[in-house]
Image (cartoon, rainbow, N blue to C red):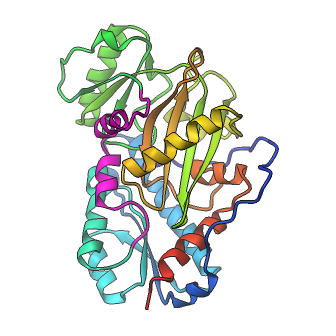
């Protein structure tokens, strides 16, 4: 899930020394007779708040942009909303490949797993994570337990699904409260960071009442925030890192990405992550990508403790907003490294096209 996108000004960093080449087979693209771009069908009544609704409605415009990028390659392409007629339409049109941008079904993140399940049953190839990767990625509680099992740092946390459950003070302070099953920054407003157990408890109870969904209470890591993007070209997991440079402290005291920041084109910009931190983070990103059953591409949010320089993984998005708009974190971080969306798109499509008869 991604909030309505605005363009942000990029910082001017020295570009990486060597050009990044993905495995690409442009001849194989000729095998693609029809590519389907699947996207979420969205209705306001399915979402508990206006913010949650707008976080999802952006995919409609993004799907159109992806369709245009594929059309530029000379490939026949068509968009399909994830509605009750979705699978029927695919079975009639018989696309060679489905580029899956579906984040929610009937407004629920957890139901997006229905798409890869249906495509698997129908034997239709599709991009992005499969059933396992999406099940894990839509549950912050599961993600964190798996990160721990793979020796990947994640902040101390507590999973709460019932009102009046006491916040564990042993987590330490400050704390940040997030929805367990929602991607992006839905539920994370400018006042998300809490400095007392009383404040955290109120935030938990308010979110449980508003969203009718479990929450994660997590120790807030004060330090740099890194966006890690992974693209798997079939041979190598390519990792691209970008450190957010915030224009101001989000709540007057801490730097973090809130849902309001997506409406402010000057809220933050990206710069390259310096050594030795980049070399410390990248192997952990690859380990997380594979351990969480991600496929093709994914995005990770990481916060670095200023005192210990420990990179704490806070979120994984296996179905991150994929599109050419440079206001999208995935595309913006790629651009920072001299990689265009078109580079990734051609490589991604050819990876599947070469397997066609």
Give the image location of residue 105, x and y in percent. Answer: 29, 58
- The answer to which of 193 and 235 lies nearer the viewer is 235
Give the image location of residue 114, x and y in percent. Answer: 25, 63
- Quarter occupied by residue 23: bottom right
In the rendered structure, does residue 141 fall within the stretch colored magenta? yes
- The answer to which of 289 and 271 lies nearer the viewer is 289
- Quarter occupied by residue 68: bottom right
Give the image location of residue 308, x and y in percent. Answer: 56, 17
Q: Residue at x 62, y 62 (%)?
A: 324
Q: Is residue 170 left or right of residue 54?
A: left
User: Which quadrant holds the C terminus?
Assistant: bottom left
Q: Is residue 311 left or right of residue 315?
A: right
Q: Residue at x 36, y 88 (%)?
A: 93
In the rendered structure, does residue 344 fall within the stretch colored magenta? no
Q: Residue at x 76, y 59 (%)?
A: 19
- Quarter occupied by residue 197: top left
Q: Residue at x 56, y 69 (%)?
A: 66
Give the image location of residue 252, x and y in percent. Answer: 59, 16
The answer to whether 321 is drawn above or below residue 80 in the figure is: above
> The magenta stretch spans which residues?
126-154
């Amino acid at each position: 899930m991604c909030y309505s996108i605005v363009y942000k000004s990029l910082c001017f960093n020295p570009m990486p020394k060597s050009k990044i080449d993905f495995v690409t087979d442009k001849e194989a693209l000729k095998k693609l007779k029809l590519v389907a771009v699947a996207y979420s069908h969205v209705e306001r009544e399915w979402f508990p708040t206006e913010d949650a609704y707008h976080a999802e409605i952006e995919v409609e415009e993004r799907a159109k942009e992806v369709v245009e990028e594929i059309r530029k390659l000379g490939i026949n392409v068509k968009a399909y909303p994830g509605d009750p007629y979705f699978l029927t339409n695919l079975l009639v049109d018989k696309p060679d490949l489905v580029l899956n941008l579906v984040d929610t079904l009937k407004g629920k993140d957890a139901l997006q797993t229905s798409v890869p399940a249906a495509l698997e049953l129908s034997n239709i190839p599709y991009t992005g994570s499969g059933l396992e990767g999406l099940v894990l990625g839509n549950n912050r509680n599961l993600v964190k337990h798996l990160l721990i099992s793979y020796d990947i740092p994640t902040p101390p946390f507590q999973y709460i699904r019932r009102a009046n459950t006491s916040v564990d003070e042993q987590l330490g302070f400050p704390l940040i409260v997030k929805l367990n099953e929602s991607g992006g920054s839905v539920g994370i407003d400018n006042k998300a960071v809490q400095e007392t157990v009383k404040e955290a408890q109120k935030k938990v109870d308010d979110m449980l009442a508003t969203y009718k969904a479990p929450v994660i209470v997590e120790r807030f890591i004060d330090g740099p925030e890194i966006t890690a993007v992974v693209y798997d070209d079939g041979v190598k997991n390519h990792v691209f890192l970008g450190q957010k440079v915030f224009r101001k402290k989000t709540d007057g005291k801490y730097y973090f990405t809130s849902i309001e920041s997506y409406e402010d084109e000057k809220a933050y910009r990206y710069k390259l992550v310096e050594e030795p931190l980049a070399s410390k983070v990248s192997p952990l990103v690859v380990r997380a990508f594979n351990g969480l059953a991600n496929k093709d591409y994914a995005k990770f949010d990481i916060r670095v403790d200023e005192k210990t320089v420990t990179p704490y993984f806070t979120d994984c998005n296996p179905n991150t907003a994929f599109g050419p708009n440079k206001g999208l974190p995935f595309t913006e971080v790629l651009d920072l490294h001299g990689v265009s969306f078109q580079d990734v798109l051609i490589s991604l499509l050819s990876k599947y096209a070469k397997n066609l008869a």
